[in-house]
Every structure is written in structure tokens, then in C-alpha cells.
Image (spheres, coloured by chain):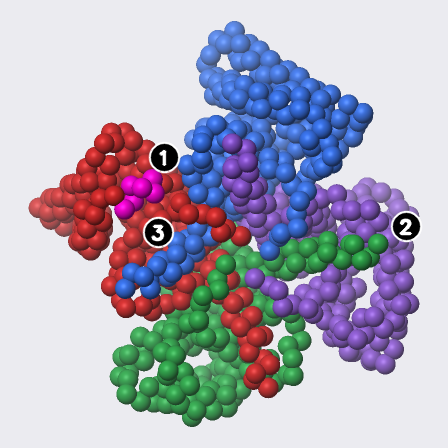
Chain colours: A purple, B blue, C red, D green
Amino acid sequence: MANPLPRVSPGLPPGTSRDPDRMAADPRLVRWETRSEGPLFAVSLLFLAAYAVHVLARGMPAYGHDICLGVIYAAWGVFLVDYVVRWRLGDYSSSLLAHVRHHVLDTVVLVLPLMRPLRFVSMYQVIQRRREKPRLSLYARVIAYSGMSAVLLGFTGALAVYQQERDAKGASIRTFGDSMWWMSSTITTVGYGDITPITPLGRTIAVGLMIGGLALLGAVTGSFSSWLLQVFSREGDEKPPAR
Amino acid sequence: MANPLPRVSPGLPPGTSRDPDRMAADPRLVRWETRSEGPLFAVSLLFLAAYAVHVLARGMPAYGHDICLGVIYAAWGVFLVDYVVRWRLGDYSSSLLAHVRHHVLDTVVLVLPLMRPLRFVSMYQVIQRRREKPRLSLYARVIAYSGMSAVLLGFTGALAVYQQERDAKGASIRTFGDSMWWMSSTITTVGYGDITPITPLGRTIAVGLMIGGLALLGAVTGSFSSWLLQVFSREGDEKPPAR
Amino acid sequence: MANPLPRVSPGLPPGTSRDPDRMAADPRLVRWETRSEGPLFAVSLLFLAAYAVHVLARGMPAYGHDICLGVIYAAWGVFLVDYVVRWRLGDYSSSLLAHVRHHVLDTVVLVLPLMRPLRFVSMYQVIQRRREKPRLSLYARVIAYSGMSAVLLGFTGALAVYQQERDAKGASIRTFGDSMWWMSSTITTVGYGDITPITPLGRTIAVGLMIGGLALLGAVTGSFSSWLLQVFSREGDEKPPAR
Amino acid sequence: MANPLPRVSPGLPPGTSRDPDRMAADPRLVRWETRSEGPLFAVSLLFLAAYAVHVLARGMPAYGHDICLGVIYAAWGVFLVDYVVRWRLGDYSSSLLAHVRHHVLDTVVLVLPLMRPLRFVSMYQVIQRRREKPRLSLYARVIAYSGMSAVLLGFTGALAVYQQERDAKGASIRTFGDSMWWMSSTITTVGYGDITPITPLGRTIAVGLMIGGLALLGAVTGSFSSWLLQVFSREGDEKPPAR
């Protein structure tokens, strides 16, 4: 179905491409990516945790919120440094604009760090690479990755929408539980509509969540479906020797 | 599309894997699985029936409920015994923790027996194996298995949500018919929202139902679609000799 | 993905199978099917039209309704005759029960003639066979067949639900337009829930509509998606000679 | 899965077909198509812009609306000229009726120019052809095309529904923001139902939007899913040399 596709390199989002000659060009970039991914993943989780505490722990004294915001801005700084280092190492000759154009997802994730979960493909691959051999089959890996990303994206989206909605007049999202319930029905495209965001920003985040959820849960569903077909077709093949 | 996948063995859920050398290791495990699957399936149905009677027959005298609970706990005991036997036979050297980690779905199903329907892949295969040759084509088998699982999962989920919601204040799920209607619109991702659960536990079950329904009905839809493509492409191939 | 599937013959629903030796057995069955499909298709449309007039033309005088009912029962009789003829010609030795078990969809369609649209695969094929070569590509044929079936199923379902709901107390489906709007949002799994059936029978029909719509529109979507992939991959192949 | 399909030519919607001998027949048609596509694309955008200004800028003085309407009718005229030229160049011998029958999508788009986004396959291909080699991989191209089409279709649909609904009595779509929110939940098949069209024409447009969104976002989802599978399967292949 898709054999002549030599251009996509693993870990790159579908919107980006690299010159083949540049790929092998700078071993420093490869080294940077290999070494930075672990720490960056940790910083991402820290960022998410600080954001969650900031949003959910409303009764916390002011200095607690200050600590959370400090962690958030520090993490953002780390992401910025990583972005600049990648630009300098990647294409010394290229302008910043060209880099932005060639790394759309990276740039989006830098500006909206709450979308970090979408960059976890590479994280996942690093973790996999550390093992001698992958523990899961192909479909299981796609299901695990998409599922994890969907959970993280959903949790982050529920947090962000909750922050926008909780004090809005006439809002139906009043507790974080409401937001999680709304998020679950959104990300699976069930969409009850008993609880919905009403602020413009909340709705904008919701649209992002719809699209992300559609794509990620679609991948889970599709892989599960392919896995079932494979299991049942394997079964058919085994019949002759089994008899 | 997916040829080099030697690790998935039929009947295993996508999240589990077995060491290849262990697979052929213990003929006692194979014998246990072959012999126990029929009775376990019967026990599962008994469990489900007792649970349904317990939830739906509210006017039943107290001793009737006691009988149902007795059946439920007895069935649970049987599931536990099966789990322990599999662990002992499977990997004598492995710790219980390793077994839990390697058999995620089995463990989940043990703790939440209402999710038993998801283990019916293997049941289905046992039934198929008893026949000389499968009566249905590949797609029909996937549709039959996924459809049956979705029906069972939906019925169980509707029961469980009904049990949580029926006495909640302000609930919109008041009869089992309401719960079935809500479940149907949820599992197909239609999601009207005219009737929705409002208790935290009811909503948690609902999220499980959304994901399970998405995956199972996605498999039904995908297989039906592939089957249609196959029928219509066969038709095209037949044209030349038909003329 | 699905090469060793010699059992599905075109025009058979996924739940049915035929003995290969029986397939070529009786040329009278083949002749009957070839000759009857055109007229049966016409009778189906007549049936649908009479049902639509019966449901929608409420102000019509009583004899008008009697005519409609007459046409409906006559059409049903024709379907019954066809069913019996197929049984006698198909498997002279087989009991009626075996025939019922082997032709699940045919039997369902006989009992619930409103589901006739689902049998249009064979109608479609007959029409195609009359042409020298198919006018449409594979994906276009699947899209055309699934789309037509979805439209017919949706129209029939909207009629049936409207008939159940229009006089129910507190119903939100008050006009046939409401019913069409509700049906469209159901069959595409959008599911607004601003208008929903409330009678038990209306809801039962709705569940059938959800599943049918899910499968048929899923086939449309999947084929459109495959068609797009094909167009865009063709484009890539053409590049070298185009330069 | 779909190798013997020589009939679909790139840029043609699934419902159309061309005689192979006619395809190469008239170089003037090819020249017209190549030269006209750029300008036609610009006229389409102009059409959309004028329509948007006409709908959204309600406080604009009357002559502003006149200008917008002028642009709209002029664009329509251009589309008509293009349609006629294609007819005359394509099949000099064929009647207008035959042309209409063979170019269903083109005709629909001519009558309902708001559906122009659906014709952007060819636009996209023209843009691609100008480059030496495609910048994106196959899946990325399908995602980009489907995503762009969905955004354009959604924006146009939100405009058209807003125009129908804003002055209707009891409408829940009161601002263009409401319409965009409703459109997003519709096109992703989430379908909250907190805001829905109530006028017959608004609902008709909504049904078109549901189907278009289903198909286009289904293509996005499916391609994303296939892309993920490809990335993760590539990863597995690289393992041996990486060690």
C-alpha cells in the first residue's frame, strides 16, 4: 500500500521533511537529540505537574502558586533552549524562518507547551531503543503510544478548559470532574453536550482536543481492528497443521 | 502492511507478550487452557446472569439476592483459581508481580469481572476449533466476534451504570430501558446526551464503555468496509470470464 | 491482507456461507435469481412508496390508506414467495430451519421488510452486470452502493420512527422534517440530541439505524479515504515521466 | 488491496470517469486546465472572501454589500465560462446532458459554488506539480489536502448556516462564533447539540457539512493512523543495524 515512501524518517511528524543529505550531516545534532530526550521528557512531566497543581490547588497559599509558575516558566525556558540548540546544530546555514517552516510541530509545541504530549513519539522511541528488543508487537506499540498520548492530551486539555471555564458566568463545567467527563465524551467523539465549554478560549481548546482525540483514538481503533484481523487470519492459517 | 510480527500469538490481547521459548514449554498449561475455557465461559455467563438478576429484580425477596451474590462470589472464586493455576503452570520461576505485568488484560478482567466479555477472543477460537473448518470468512469472523463482544459489553455496562444511577438524586437514567438507550447511543459514539449518567462511578464506567465500544464497533465497521471492498473487487475480476 | 478467503461469494452478506459444491448445483436457482432481481427491486420500491404515503399522507381519505396497506401486504407476499422459491430451489434436501440458519440476512429482511435496502448489494450487481463494463472504479462503486443504501435506510428509518413518535406524549419528533434531521445526525454518528425518540419502539428502530449507518457510512468514509490515498500516490508515481 | 484499478485518473472525483481514448484526445483541454487552475483558485478565494464579508459585515453601508454581490456574481460567471469551455473542449460530439452526467461533481460545484473547496484536489496537484519534487510524504499530502479542504468547507458551511440562522426566531446560533463552535462539533462528529440549526435550509446545509466532514476528517484520521503504523514499523526494521 505504501512502499515508495523514502522521505518520512521515524520520529518526524507528517508535516516536516529533511533533506536526506542533511540527515547524516551533523553527528552533534544526533548526539544532542539522544541525550536531551530523557531530561526533556522529565521536564515535560514537571511542567505538566506544576500546571496541574496551579490549576487544581486553588486553596494553596500564594507562594505555592508562585513556585508552580516558577517551574512552568523555567520549563518553558528549557524548551526554548532545546529549540535554539536544535536550530543551530541542524542547519547552520539556514535562517530561523526556514527552521520554523521546516519544523512546524516543534514550533507549535514550543509556543503551546500544553501540546507537548504530541511530541512523545520520539520519547517513546528512545525508551524502546534502550531495550534489547521491543516488548510489544507493532499494533500494540501504536495502541500504547496513541493511547498514552490521548490520555496525556486529554488530561492537559481538561485542565486547560477547566481553568478557562470555572469562573465563567453560566458555565456548566464547574468542577475538574465535570471537565474530565466532558473531555472523555469529546475525545471519543461521543459528545453528549450535557456539559460544554462556553468561553471563546475554552471552545478553542476544545476544538484542538476534538481533532487530537479524533486522530489519536482513530489510530487506537484502527490498530486494534487490524490486530483483530491479524489474530483471526492467523487462526485460519493454523488450521491445517492443527488438524 | 505488517509482515514481520512473529510475537503476537492468537488469543493474546495486544498488551501482552510471551517469551517464544516459554510458549511451547509447558504442555500442562496448554491442556489446562484447552480444558478450562469451556467451563470458564459457562461460569462467565452464570456470573453475568446472576448480576443481571441481582440488579434488575428489585422486588425479589432478600434470599434471592443472597443466592445471586453467592453465585457472583463463587464465580469470582473460580476466576481467581484459574488465574493462580495459569500463573503456577505458566512460569514456575516467575514472581506473581512479573505475571501481573505480563498479563495485564487477564489481571484487569480478574479484578473487574464485568469486563470478561473482552476475553472472549479465546472462547470464540475454542468454539471455532471444534469445527472441522470455520463456517465464516475472515471478515465475518471478526464482525461476529466484535459484535458479540460489543453486545455483551454493552449489556453489562448498561447494567452497571443502571445500578449506580437509579437511586441518584436528579439522575436521568431511571429505568433499565433508559440505560440501554443511553448505552446504545454511547457505544456507537452517537451520544445524544438526552440521558446521561451523573454519578462519578457511573461516569467512570461510561468512559470504559466509550473506549470499548469505539474499539469493538470500529472493528465491526472496518471489517464490514473491507468485506464490501472485497465483494466489489471480486465482482470486477469476474467480469472478463462472465462476458 | 486478505488473500485466502475463497468462501465469500459476491452478493452474500458476511454472515452467510454456501457449500462450494452447492453453488453451481442448481441452474434453476441461478436463473430465478437473475430473472427475479429486477422485479423484486421494483416491488421493494413500490413497498417503500406505499409505506411512505401511508405514513406521511395523514389527511388522505380512508380508502387511500387501504390501498397503501394492500400494496404493502401484496409486496410482502411477493417477498415471501421469493423466499420460499429460493429455499426449494436452493437446497431441496435441507429443512426450512437449516435454510433460515444459512440465510440470516434474507430471513431478517423478510420479517422486517423495511430493512430491504440492505439487500441491495445484489440489485446493484445485477444492474452493473447488464453493462459491458463497470462505469465506476472499485472505490466509487463501494461509495455509490453504500451511499445509496444509507440514503434508503435513513429514509425508511426516519419514516418508521416518525410513525412511532408523532403521537407520543412529550415527543420531540413532531414533523417528518424533525425525523429526517434526527436521522441525519444519528446515521453520521454526530448525535446532537436536540431531537430524540422517546418511545421504546422508536428507540429500538433508532439503534438499528445507528448500527446500519455506522457500517454503511464507515464504508463510504473508508473508501473515500483509500481513494484519496490512491490518487495522491498515483500522482507521486507520475512525477518522473512528467518532468 | 487495490491494484487493478486503471480507470481512476488523478484529480477526478470518484463519481466520474473518462474514456481512456478521450483522455489524450484534446491537448487544448489539457492546456486550458493547466492554465486556468491557478486563476480559478484565486477567483474561488475571492468568491469566498466576498461572501464572508457580505455575511459578516452587517453594519457595512449598502454599496459595500453591492460590491460583494458583484464580486460573487462575477466569480460565478467565471465558473460558468470555465464549465462551458471544458464541455466544448472535452467532448465536441457530446451533448450537454452527457457532459453533466459525466461530471457530477463539477456540476454540483457549479450550482453550489460554496462547495468549491471539494474541487481543491486538482488545485493542490497543480501547486505540487510546480515544485521539482513533492515536499511531503504520501500520508502528509493526504492529511494536508483533506485538512485544508475540511477547514475551508467548515468555514464556508459556518458562514452559510450563520446567514440562515441568525434572524430565525428561537435560533441558538446567534453569533458567528456560535456557528464556528457548532460547525467544529459537527464536522468532527462530536455533536454536542448545545447549539443547533433550526431552519430547514440551515439543517440541509448542516447535513452536507456532516457528510463532507465525515469523509474529509476520516481521511485525515486514516492517514494519520497509517502514518503512525509506518513510523513504528520502520522503527522495528532499524533495530538490527542500530545495535
Which image quadrant: the C terminus of chain B?
Answer: bottom left
> Is the residue under label 1 in contact with that under label 2 (CB below 8 Å)?
no
Measured from the top left, where is residue A154 in percent x and y?
68, 49
- What residue sits right under mark 3 in the picture? C10
- Name which residue type carries label 2: Ile
Q: Residue at x 46, y 45 (%)?
A: B139
- What residue sits right under mark 1 in the picture? C200
> Which residues are the magenta region?
C19-24
Helix, strand or loop at label 3? It is loop
- Name which residue type carries label 3: Pro
Front: mark 3 or 2: 3
Is the residue marked by circle 2 packed among few (<14), some (14-19), or many (20+) residues within 10 Å?
few
Residue A174 appears in the figure: no
- What residue sits right under mark 2 in the picture? A67
Measured from the top left, where is residue A56 in percent x and y?
77, 44
Residue in front for this viewpoint, D213 or B135: B135
Front: mark 2 or 1: 1
Please report, as a chain letter, where disc 3 is located: C
Residue D100 appears in the figure: yes
Q: Are discs 3 and 2 both within one chain?
A: no
